[in-house]
Amino acid sequence: MKKTANRYEYLTQTPVPQLICRLAVPTILSMLVTGLYNSADTFFVGRISTQATAAVGLVFSVMAMVQALGFFCGQAQFLRSRMDLIRAEWI
């Protein structure tokens, strides 16, 4: 219960800009890894043809948008569920 209370205090009393930066780090790292993977993929696919390189470039932009939307929805739902659990313990 102590750990949950500390999380509740952390999420409710930390300044919003600092909290956003802290919570965004896993998402940023994941997107950097994906970008590096795509760069390597583009390098090797570029040896096949320019059409293949174009296809990889188009797919990456779509994949990045889907990934960003998934992170947004997933983290928002996770935080909401955690806050609901913490509130239930305080009542």
Image (cartoon, grey):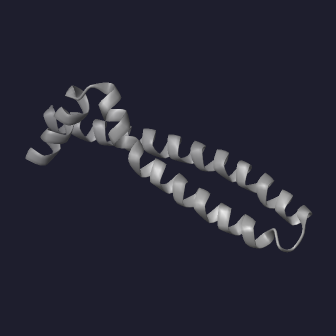
Q: Position of residue 74 (x, y in %)?
A: 48, 46
User: Considering only vertical position in the picture, is 60 above or below 77?
Assistant: below
Q: Is 43 situated left or right of 88 in this image?
A: right
Q: Quadrant of residue 48?
A: bottom right
Q: Residue at x 68, y 53 (%)?
A: 63
Q: Is 24 situated left or right of 64 in this image?
A: left
The answer to whether residue 1 shows anywhere in this view is no
Query: Which residue occupies the foreground of this view, 43 or 91?
Result: 43
Query: Which residue occupies the foreground of this view, 63 or 89?
Result: 63
Q: Looking at the image, how many numbered discs can be counted on the residues?
A: 0
User: Considering only vertical position in the picture, is 11 above or below 34?
Assistant: above
Q: Residue at x 30, y 32 (%)?
A: 18
Q: Is 52 situated left or right of 66 in this image?
A: right
Query: Which residue occupies the foreground of this view, 13 or 56?
Result: 56
Query: Which residue occupies the foreground of this view, 10 or 89?
Result: 10
Q: Position of residue 33 (x, y in %)?
A: 53, 60
User: Considering only vertical position in the picture, is 25 above or below 46?
Assistant: above
Q: Position of residue 80 (x, y in %)?
A: 37, 37
Q: Quadrant of the C terminus?
A: top left
Q: Quadrant of residue 88?
A: top left
The answer to whether residue 79 shows anywhere in this view is yes
Q: Residue at x 22, y 33 (%)?
A: 87
Q: Is 85 situated left or right of 47 in this image?
A: left
Q: Residue at x 36, y 37 (%)?
A: 21
